[in-house]
Image: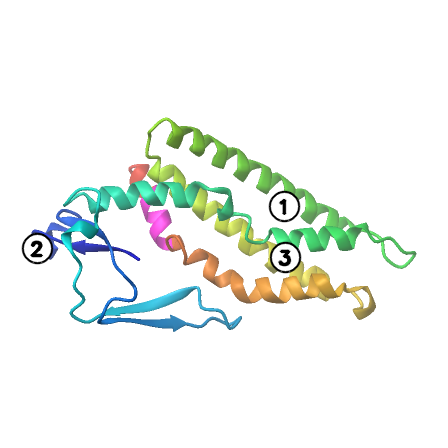
Amino acid sequence: MIALVRTSGAPDDRQKGLSQFIVDMKAPGMEVRPLVDLCGDAHFNEVLLDDVFVPESAMVGQEGQGWAQVNAELAYERSGPERFYSSAVLLNAWLSSLRVRTPERTVSGEELAALGKFATHMVALRQVSVALTTKLSAGESPLVEAALMKDLGTEFEQSVPSVLEAMVGALPPEQQEPELLRALNYLSLMAPSFSLRGGTREILRGMVARGLGLR
């Protein structure tokens, strides 16, 4: 794993004096405690280090520049399309179910409105992601813009299962596609974690507010 640790100064220095190191997960003294979520998966872990030795050669980048490096890495992580594609499988399953036409099953106005909202939201997010990729390719570090991108992307990918729960749940059982239900059940349980990974919603919005001079 890559760890951000203090290598100089004092805790009061905040971000100054922090460095990054690659830590061998199999090193003596390493303990990993998986945090199992509602789906039975473990995407997050509690990691404990008990007198773990990390050689100086394992340092990433420059000593004391860890915070700047982390920010640059987070700009990449938060700006990518995976920030809003987590619910894509559910969206595809829902669209497939809408294509099935029977006398008893027609697309409602509510479904058309939801489809239009999802499509416009995703197109806008993709445009922002492409724009941020352009900045990153030019050597810039759009940290605030990437935080906004991640927050908006998380809002979108959490809204998909939330909106579809109500619409799919209102259909008669015989009109509910098994594949759609499986995707919906899984995403409904996973969605709360979307606003945790890559930075919590509260942290991201604080960054945006600070970047706009509002904090």
Q: Residue furthest top?
A: 138
Tags 1 and 3 touching, CB below 8 Å: yes
Q: Which residue is drawn at 54% across and 49% down?
A: 156
| Residue segment shown in magenta | 202-208
Three-letter code, disc 2: Ala
Q: Which residue is drawn at 71% across and 54% down?
A: 94
Q: Answer above or below: position of 179 versus 58.
A: below
Q: For this rendering, which residue is in front, 43 or 127?
A: 43
Magenta stretch, main secondary structure class: helix
Q: Answer above or below: position of 58 versus 81.
A: below
Q: Residues within 10 Å of mark 3 (few under 14, many from 20)?
A: few
| Front of the two marks 2 and 3 | 2
Three-letter code, disc 3: Val
Sequence-earlier tag: 1 or 2: 2
| Front of the two marks 1 and 2 | 2
Number of the label disc, if any, that sits on residue 163:
3
| 149 sits left or right of 56 in the view | right
